[in-house]
Amino acid sequence: MEALIAGLVILLLVVLFLGLGFWIFSGLFLVSVGGLVLLEGMPLERIGIIATNIIYSYSSAWELAAIPMFIWMGEIIFRTDLSDRLFRGLSPLVDFIPGRLLHTNIMGCTLFAAVSGSSTATTATVGKITTGELSRRGYDSNLSIGSLAGAGSLGLLIPPSIVMIIYGILAEVSISRLFAAGILPGLLVAAVYSTYIMIRAGLDPSKSPRGAERYSLRDRLYGVVNLLPVFFLVIIVLGSIYSGIATPSEAAAVGVAGAVLVTLALRQLTLEIFLESLKGALRTSCMVCSILIAAAFLSTAMGYLGIPRNLAEAITGMNLSPIALILILSLFYVMLGLFLDGISIIVMSLPITLPLVTMAGFDPVWFGVYLVLMTELAQVTPPIGFNLFVIQGLTGHPIGKVALAAFPFFLLMCLSVVIITIFPEIALWLPEVLFG
């Protein structure tokens, strides 16, 4: 019980600090130092040594090299007309499906997620074209912005995913296996979204009115040509990993080189775009890496306090079934998602939740996919959901309207979590096939 109380106090303090506007890095460090001093009685000199070792260890970790490189790749692509090409390429291919161009949100985000690794970048890049086009053509506003909010979160699940890299480093799980594990669940979520749109459009055809365009076979073939830059990046990044040619960190460098080649081929690479993308990648990478260091310090502090071990023993003594444990954790993560972003949720909760699920018999790779799905829910829940604010900026709609439009897709994502919990092979089959 003492471990449970101590763990809850630390989590509540983290939420309090972040809610008061503290930087995530500062909030995690303050809670960690305070816990070690007040609860463990550890002198500041020893805490300084621990912090120094953690900073050195994480600053020199080769796996971390993948984060700035994948971010840089996304920054370069974000500054091209790739979103316009996605829309023009997908439009002829989805026009015959019930829901028509609404599927450009789902498929566009699914494809761009495979070259971005970021939920907000995926939402912003795809949404800057689709929101205006769908509104101009008379498509249902709620389905348009709701599907974009839900599908934009796929940037966290479909590899290469920055959040998966963070989980892999903190949980000491193979990033290559995590990337492979995210593919089928990501496609499952996209399929669930598209099925919902087809059902809604089938019940009410006015939600997806047919335009004046009539696409020929030539138009559809030309649409595939427009998608080739995205396919090229997906193939060289994921292909280099799964073929064994490159590690995830090396594949990230391959991705940057590919992004440069794509922008050169599209005649859009200028010195200004190159420098702006580099600055954006530097700012984001420093933020993410500083959070990782602070999260590692918090994990170490919790280890010294014995919280994960004692809490795991306490919950094991409750004789909860694995499904009951996942249900409790799901409610816990949904609550956290109301107040925190995805990275914060992972780094602050993982030291406690990972020992629990491994003791319950869950595969850490599967739990990584589950956890990413739960952080995706945080992207579409007010008041912190980043995707909601991105869409508000794109459309000008009130945040309440955007949140209500996204709510059905929130429920659909919950359904996807239930499906992969009942059928964990959806996440584990591909890593087993590729890596044994």
Image (tube, rainbow, N blue to C red):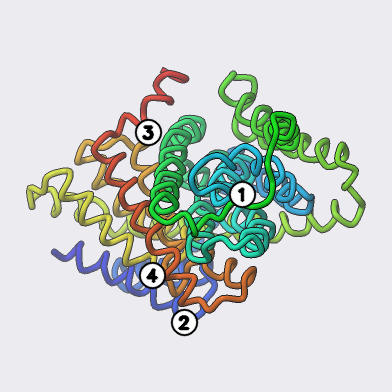
* Secondary structure type for disc 4: loop
Residue 138 position, x and y percent, is 59, 63
**Label 2 to label 3: alpha-carbon separation:** 37 Å
Amino acid identity at mark 1? Ser
Mark 1, mark 3: which one is toward the viewer? 3
Instruction: Report helix, strand or loop for mark 3.
Output: helix
- In the image, residue 376 sits, relative to residue 94, either above or below, namely below
Residue assigned mark 3: 427
Residue 327, given in percent of the width and then of the height, sits at: 21, 53
- N-terminal-most mark, 4 or 2: 2
Q: Amino acid at mark 2?
A: Leu
The disc, 2 or 3, on the residue closer to the chain's N-terminal end is: 2
- Relative vertical location of residue 18 with respect to residue 201 in this rendering, above or below: below
Circle 4 residue: 338
- How busy is the neighbourhood of tag 4: few (under 14 within 10 Å), some, or many (20 plus)? some
The picture places residue 281, in percent across and down from the top left corner, at 71, 54
Give the secondary structure at mark 2. loop
Q: Measure how far apart labels 4 and 1 are at the Cα level.
A: 31 Å
* Alpha carbons under labels 1 and 2: distance apart: 28 Å
Q: Is residue 51 visible?
A: no
For mark 1, what is the residue? 59
* Distance (Cα) linking label 4 and label 2: 15 Å
| Earlier-in-chain disc, 1 versus 3 | 1
Residue type highlighted by circle 3: Ala
